């Protein structure tokens, strides 16, 4: 192992003889030990043997002069360095009820869901992080506005003296327009729900009554409207799919999904509310706010010719969304029985233990005594003989109690005597020296003999295997009444494997340099990587001139992702590199404790710019076999996905550099290193940029793609976006 990042301090070799010196020394000894040998010509077989053994000796001396890897590991242990445990992937799972319930319903935390088990892969288990409370939604206000505002103030009440509410919460009355009579882009209507009902993360089915074809002029397949909910800071989109809108943009044209009575049709819109849906005051109205906005029609489509009108409103909760982590919780595990000796250790049945929560601790039950809750500590440096402390290694699952250490009981007196010798020349007497005795000190309490030791609860899991795709968590492992199905509408993100020794070797010198304080840009980058195992890269740009803001530090963070997708020829989708709320909070909490006072940190994800390559590759004549051609094609695809990648890309394979452009020559140089490639045709680069929720694909001008100062190049396979690389082989 070579540590090029360490300072180049003077090093003394234990044996500094070189290969030439070894050969010369052997030749000088020939007359003494073999006087009949007189021919020292380099072509002589004896000289050849001397050079061979000198070379072997030189190799042994090279190894002899290096510090063994075992010693370096010991140095890390003396510094108290521990390998960081794995990090579980995080996602949001939605549970759907079999029917709407009349009362509030709570699903407890720790409910287990999993991916489907196959012949090749085991099921990956997730557990919910918190309880899920499904309330009884009731509409309180129906309001309209002419213009779109972030915090609406000019609102018109459509319920006042016109609609009545039944006992079941159903509102009905005279038909009311949802937009202006001549609708304009920006018209919207608001629904305020009862503020006292817990509806955070609920899935709400909104039933609407209206006339068929009430929105004449729009395309029901692409209606120009947007459903949003106020999460306390911004408006979030809550309509996941167009098929969830049974009204088809208030046109009520799909008879198969609707009920019709007297020419009035009723249809439902399924909306997934944000996890934080607080009660807020807008104007003089209070509630949990939902709105529908008339948006600009798509190119070639027409908008509303007249406003749709509603004659009835009702709502019910059909499920809820909650955060989940890739882990399995184990409760009340028996570790063993104490033998009463200091420093004893026990091992949990599982490894890869996740950070402990409030209800995860060790319970020690003495003989004929009551159970005692013990406290976990990082080490026993501050533990006294009566402190109920223990340590837990998250990688191995080893639980250890405090040891006994032999040390002086009169350290202060020793220091005083030494100062007398140095300052006054006083020589301590034999009585004074005898008073300084060595005793045994107990660090942390030892469970009495016969105590039963149990772990109340702990969670195991984590790793990149938890970064699963959307709609892959569909198996409900815990039996929950009324829950008929479960699914993750978004991909699981930010899972990371346990730290390796090589990664710790790179981390420790940076950690010692920063001294746990963020001052320079390099400090912020280093501590961001230290904050979570889920962070793959961190970049702190230095702004100059008008672009700089006093007291503001911008941090660009790239999370870790499943690298196995590259070897499968799929690349890494930018959605899998999203900066999740859990990771953002973890990093910010870590940095806020280490930043200077008055410094504001802005955490953001880079602007990912996709690159798709299209070219023609000519092969050598001997690669005419179809199987060989398929292997070369797969190799070229994987090389591109690995090269144009935020985590493994670039010439140094350490991740594409922030703001670095992609040139056509980069692709040519990459392909020329592949065995079997004879020539390349025209290389075309296509640029993919995100615009809102969609991606646009354009041909790169001048054979170059510039991602921008904080941009980052990536590539992935998606046939709908045409982001895949198109390579044609010619023999």
Image (spheres, rainbow, N blue to C red):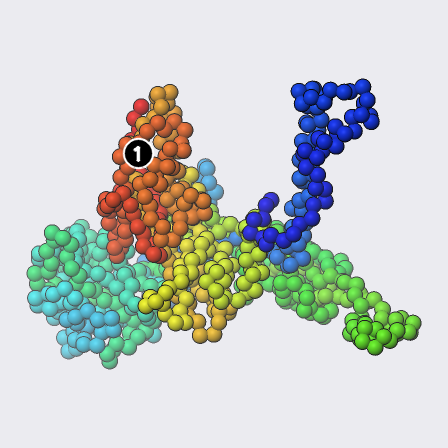
Closer-to-camera residue (35/17)? 35
On-image quarter of the C terminus? top left
Query: For the residue labelled by badge 1, is the local secondary structure a helix, a strand or a loop?
Result: strand
Residue 238: x %, y % from top left: 28, 60
Relative to 127, residue 143 above or below: below
Q: Is residue 536 visible?
A: yes
Closer-to-camera residue (718/467)? 718
Residue 383: x %, y % from top left: 69, 68
Residue appearing at x 81%, y 73% in the figure = 422
Residue appearing at x 59%, y 45% in the figure = 2
Q: Is residue 11 left or right of residue 507?
A: right
Q: How many marks?
A: 1
Q: Is residue 415 left or right of residue 525?
A: right
Of all residues, the one furthest to the right in this rendering is 430
Q: Is residue 563 visible?
A: no
The residue where tag 1 is placed is 727
Relative to 649, residue 133 above or below: below
Residue 712: x %, y % from top left: 36, 52
Residue appearing at x 19%, y 72% in the figure = 143
Q: Is residue 154 left or right of residue 581?
A: left
Residue 686: x %, y % from top left: 27, 44
On-image quarter of the N terminus? top right
């Amino acid at each position: 192992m070579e540590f090029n990042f360490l300072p180049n301090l003077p090093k003394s070799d234990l044996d500094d003889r070189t290969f030439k010196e070894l050969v010369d020394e052997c030749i000088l000894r020939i007359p003494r030990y073999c006087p009949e040998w007189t021919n020292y010509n380099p072509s002589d077989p004896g000289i050849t043997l001397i050079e061979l053994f000198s070379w072997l000796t030189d190799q042994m001396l090279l190894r002899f002069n290096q510090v063994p890897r075992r010693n370096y590991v010991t140095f890390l242990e003396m510094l108290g360095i521990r390998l960081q445990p794995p990090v579980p992937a995080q996602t949001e799972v939605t549970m759907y009820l079999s029917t709407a319930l009349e009362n509030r319903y709570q699903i407890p935390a720790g409910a287990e869901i999993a991916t489907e088990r196959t012949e090749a892969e085991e099921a990956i288990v997730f557990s919910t992080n918190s309880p899920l409370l499904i309330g009884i939604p009731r509409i309180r206000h129906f309001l309209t506005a002419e213009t779109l505002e972030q915090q609406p103030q000019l609102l018109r009440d459509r319920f006042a003296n016109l609609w009545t509410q039944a006992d079941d919460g159903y509102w009905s009355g005279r038909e009311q327009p949802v937009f202006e009579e001549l609708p304009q882009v920006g018209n919207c209507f608001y629904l305020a729900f009862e503020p006292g009902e817990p509806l955070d993360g609920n899935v709400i089915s909104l039933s609407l009554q209206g006339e068929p074809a009430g929105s004449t002029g729009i395309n029901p397949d692409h209606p120009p409207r947007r459903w949003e909910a106020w999460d306390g800071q911004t408006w979030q989109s809550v309509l996941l799919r167009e098929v969830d809108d049974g009204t088809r943009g208030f046109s009520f044209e799909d008879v198969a999904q609707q009920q019709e009575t007297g020419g009035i049709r009723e249809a439902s819109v399924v909306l997934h509310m944000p996890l934080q849906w607080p009660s807020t005051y807008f104007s003089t109205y209070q509630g949990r706010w939902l709105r529908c906005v008339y948006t600009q029609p798509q190119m070639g489509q027409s908008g509303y010719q007249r406003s749709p009108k509603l004659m009835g409103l009702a709502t019910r909760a059909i499920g809820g969304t909650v955060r989940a982590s890739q882990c399995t919780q184990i409760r009340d595990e028996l570790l063993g029985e104490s033998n009463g000796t200091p420093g004893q250790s026990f091992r949990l049945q599982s490894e890869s233990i996740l950070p402990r929560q409030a209800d995860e601790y060790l319970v020690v039950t003495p003989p004929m005594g009551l159970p005692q809750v013990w406290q976990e500590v990082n080490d026993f440096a501050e533990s006294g003989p009566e402190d109920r402390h223990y340590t837990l290694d998250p990688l191995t699952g080893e639980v250890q109690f405090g040891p006994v250490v032999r040390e002086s009981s009169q350290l202060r007196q020793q220091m005083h005597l030494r100062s007398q010798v140095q300052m006054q020349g006083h020589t301590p007497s034999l009585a004074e020296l005898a008073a300084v005795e060595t005793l045994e000190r107990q660090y942390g309490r030892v469970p009495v003999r016969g105590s039963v030791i149990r772990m109340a609860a702990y969670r195991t899991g984590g790793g990149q295997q938890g970064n699963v795709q959307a709609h892959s968590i569909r198996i409900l492992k815990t039996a929950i009444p009324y829950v008929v199905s479960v699914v993750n509408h978004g991909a699981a993100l930010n899972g990371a494997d346990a730290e390796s020794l090589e990664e710790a070797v790179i981390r420790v010198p940076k950690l010692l340099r920063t001294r746990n304080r963020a001052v320079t840009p390099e400090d912020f980058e280093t501590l961001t990587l230290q904050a979570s195992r889920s962070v793959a890269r961190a970049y702190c740009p230095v702004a100059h001139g008008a672009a700089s803001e006093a007291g503001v530090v911008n941090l660009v963070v790239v999370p870790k992702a499943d690298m196995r997708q590259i070897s499968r020829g799929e690349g890494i989708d930018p959605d899998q590199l999203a900066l999740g709320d859990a990771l953002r909070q973890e990093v910010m909490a870590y940095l806020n404790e280490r930043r200077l006072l008055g410094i504001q940190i802005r955490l953001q994800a880079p602007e990912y710019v996709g690159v798709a390559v299209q070219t023609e590759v000519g092969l050598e004549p001997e690669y005419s076999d179809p199987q060989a051609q398929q292997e070369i094609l797969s190799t070229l695809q994987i090389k591109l996905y690995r090269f144009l990648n935020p985590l493994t890309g670039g010439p140094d394979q350490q991740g594409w550099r922030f703001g670095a452009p992609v040139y056509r020559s980069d692709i040519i140089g990459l392909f020329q290193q592949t065995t079997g490639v004879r020539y390349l045709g025209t290389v075309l680069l296509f640029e993919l940029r995100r615009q809102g929720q969609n991606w646009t694909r354009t041909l790169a001008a001048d054979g170059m793609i510039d991602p921008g100062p904080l941009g980052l190049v990536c590539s992935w396979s998606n046939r709908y976006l045409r982001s895949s690389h198109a390579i044609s082989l010619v023999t």
